[in-house]
Image: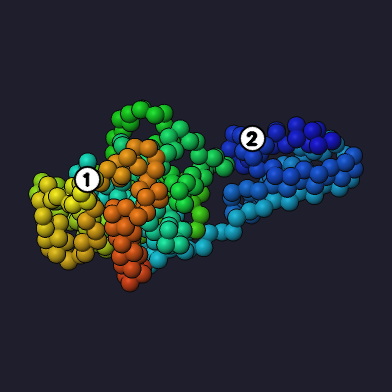
């Protein structure tokens, strides 16, 4: 009888979708004999009308079995309560309490490495943390976490984030073939960034980090309009040419009404593995001066340390595997300062930067 029920359930389509409820994995339990049956489903939609439609369709599909009793139980998530610190404006991921944007004015400064190690360090503080690899053109986070080739689980029309190294992760890098280049225009980038936030089943998180692409373009604007960002972190090197671009990133934070948590100076010096001395090969004091100019904190100075590079290449982040290293300790200190900033500043607001249509905000929440 159970096989007969499965055959018929495989013909019941999920409302508004092409696939059936068996293919989506919504059917969790079936108990049956010749006279009665119990079917348990677990779906992702909170709308009660979806459950009503499914019960109707299941009863219709099993009608020819002439069961005397058919009990269909459908478990649904509760309608999402606003968990974030948003005051107003749009928020496509309300189950996340706080959002941190990690950005840089130019590429190659170690932004992704910094974002990832901050996220892991914060998770080790006992917080529930996630990271969105929003660097559409260069999604490196899967490589750094050893998750290249890992496919996220599909639940209905949404994706489950990958839980690894104590944090939740989603990246365009796990959705496309390795080495595939994306030649996308602005509108496609904007849509992809928003979907990484809205079409992923993020759990209730204390903090969600956004690893942004270099520069001050569409991805940054879309993110700021889609979610209320509590803190912006700018990653730079001590070189003047890097700092020039970093100032643009800090200026972008101001224009997007993102509170500036601080600057992280990456590659602040070379940490010699032979003698443990730190050599300031790219300059000294420049990032601190820039932080002072923008009235924010210099959160950390991270040296060039071989363990960091090796960990990134091998999928073994230094903050997780080498917690006693110089770099890991400085990431941990920066994560604590960042969390203190979030706690102190509290809620955020992105209403003022929403698109305007016919003189009215296009904000949808």
Quadrant the N terminus occupies = top right
Q: Residues within 10 Å of mark 2 (few under 14, many from 20)?
A: some
Front-most of residues 152 and 309: 309
Decide: is 333 above or below 60: below
Marker count (numbered): 2
Quadrant in the rendering for residue 333: bottom left
Q: Position of residue 298 (x, y in %)?
A: 21, 61
Q: Residue at x 61, y 34 (%)?
A: 19
Q: CA distance from mark 1 to mark 2?
A: 57 Å
Front-most of residues 239 and 97: 239
Decide: is 179 above or below 223: above
Q: Residue at x 35, y 42 (%)?
A: 311
- Side (left or right) of 30 relative to 23: right
Q: Position of residue 8 (x, y in %)?
A: 75, 34
- Side (left or right) of 52 relative to 95: right
Quadrant in the rendering for residue 7: top right
* Residue position marked by numbered label 2 in the rendering: 23
- Residue placed farthest to the bottom in the image? 344
Does dot 1 land on a helix, a strand or a loop? Answer: loop
| Front label number (1 vs 2) | 1
* Residue position marked by numbered label 1 in the rendering: 274
Q: Position of residue 305 (x, y in %)?
A: 25, 46
């Amino acid at each position: 009888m159970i096989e007969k029920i499965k055959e018929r359930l495989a013909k019941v389509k999920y409302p508004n979708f092409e696939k059936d409820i068996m293919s989506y994995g919504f059917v969790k339990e079936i108990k049956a004999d010749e006279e009665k049956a119990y079917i348990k489903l677990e779906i992702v939609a909170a709308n009660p009308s979806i459950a009503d439609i499914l019960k109707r369709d299941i009863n219709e599909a099993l009608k020819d079995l002439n069961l005397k009793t058919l009990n269909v139980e459908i478990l649904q998530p509760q309608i999402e309560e606003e968990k974030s610190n948003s005051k107003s404006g749009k928020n496509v991921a309300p189950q996340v309490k706080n959002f941190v944007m990690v950005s840089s004015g130019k590429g190659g400064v170690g932004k992704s490495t910094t974002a990832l190690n901050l996220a892991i360090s914060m998770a080790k503080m006992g917080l529930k943390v996630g990271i969105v690899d929003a660097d559409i053109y260069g999604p490196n986070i899967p490589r750094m976490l050893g998750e290249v080739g890992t496919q996220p689980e599909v639940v209905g029309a949404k994706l489950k984030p990958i839980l690894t190294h104590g944090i939740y992760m989603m990246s365009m890098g796990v959705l496309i073939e390795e080495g595939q280049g994306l030649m996308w225009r602005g509108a496609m980038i904007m849509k992809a960034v928003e979907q990484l936030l809205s079409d992923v089943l993020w759990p209730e998180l204390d903090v969600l980090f956004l690893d942004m692409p270099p520069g001050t373009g569409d991805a940054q604007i879309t993110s700021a309009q889609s979610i209320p960002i509590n803190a912006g972190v700018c990653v730079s090197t001590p070189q003047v040419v890097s700092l020039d671009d970093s100032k643009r990133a800090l200026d972008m934070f101001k224009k997007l009404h993102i509170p500036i948590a601080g600057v992280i100076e990456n590659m602040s010096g070379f940490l010699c593995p032979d003698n443990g001395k730190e050599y300031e090969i790219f300059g000294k004091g420049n990032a601190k001066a820039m932080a002072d100019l923008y009235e924010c904190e210099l959160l950390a100075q991270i040296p060039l340390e071989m363990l960091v590079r090796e960990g990134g290449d091998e999928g073994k982040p230094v903050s997780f595997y080498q917690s006693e290293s110089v770099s890991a300790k400085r990431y941990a200190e920066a994560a604590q300062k960042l969390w203190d900033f979030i706690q102190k500043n509290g809620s955020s607001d992105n209403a003022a930067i929403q698109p305007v249509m016919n003189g009215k905000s296009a904000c949808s929440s």
